[in-house]
Image (cartoon, helix red, strand yellow):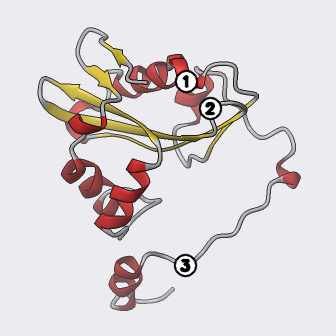
């Protein structure tokens, strides 16, 4: 279901045809700490299989969030970012408000996300530290090939 939320400064949309893959891929592959070096085709595939939220200032995409969900019980919020040019203007809050109000994501039992530095933003939307972190398990593969190749030239600590 397409969903549109229009706060004062930016529009938050879920129409996949409006998302700017160049902006999303560019930020994730070059500016994010969590997806550095991710291949463009992998980003495109991830977008096709997720509910995506784009933040737009006019026709320019300035932010993004992605939700992976079964639309019944569980949602994983990921790849949330706001371009430097629009940080500090509440765009992250607008993105998360749109995520949490999306009609297909209501009544879910569990929401999860990972963050290194945006805990206060997510707390405003009901997130907290995991109640039982000892129950969380994961499989984490190595870095994306491009990121690994870039690191080969870096000095090791």
Identify residue for label 2. Answer: 71
Give coordinates of residue 11: x percent, y percent. 26, 19
First in sequence: mark 1 vs mark 2? 2
- Spatial CA distance of label 3 from label 1 is 33 Å
Relative image position of residue 105 (x, y in whole percent): 58, 25
The answer to whether the residues at label 1 and label 2 have Cβ atoms under 8 Å apart is yes
Of 1 and 51, the residue lying toward us: 1
Q: Earlier in the sequence, mark 3 or mark 2?
A: 2
Q: Secondary structure at mark 2?
A: loop
Q: Which residue is depicted at the point 38% across and 56% down? A: 32
Task: Select label 3 or label 2 by which is in front.
Answer: 2
Q: Residue at x 87, y 53 (%)?
A: 135
Q: Residue at x 24, y 57 (%)?
A: 26
Graded by Cα atoms within 10 Å as few (under 14), some (14 to 19) or many (20 or more), the crowding at tag 2 reads some
In the rendered structure, the answer to whether residue 124 lies left or right of residue 110 reads left
Q: Which sits earlier in the primary sequence, circle 3 or circle 1?
A: 1
In the displayed orientation, state which residue is furthest to the front: 1
Q: Which residue is mark 1?
A: 104
Would residue 127 appear left or right of 103 to someone viewing this image?
right
Confirm or deny contact between disc 3 and disc 1 (CB under 8 A): no
Q: Residues within 10 Å of mark 3 (few under 14, many from 20)?
A: few
């Amino acid at each position: 279901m397409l969903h549109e939320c229009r706060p004062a400064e930016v529009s938050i949309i879920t129409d996949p045809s409006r998302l700017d893959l160049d902006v999303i891929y560019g930020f994730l592959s070059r500016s994010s700490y969590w997806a550095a070096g991710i291949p463009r085709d992998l980003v495109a595939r991830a977008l096709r299989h997720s509910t995506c939220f784009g933040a737009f200032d006019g026709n320019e995409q300035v932010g993004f969030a992605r939700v992976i969900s079964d639309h019944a019980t569980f949602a994983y919020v990921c790849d949330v970012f706001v371009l430097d040019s629009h940080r500090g203007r509440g765009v992250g809050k607008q993105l998360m408000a749109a995520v949490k109000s999306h009609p297909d994501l209501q009544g879910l039992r569990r929401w999860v996300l990972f963050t290194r530095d945006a805990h206060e933003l997510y707390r405003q939307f009901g997130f907290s530290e995991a109640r039982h972190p000892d129950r969380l398990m994961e499989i984490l593969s190595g870095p994306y090939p491009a990121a690994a190749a870039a690191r080969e030239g870096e000095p090791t600590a």
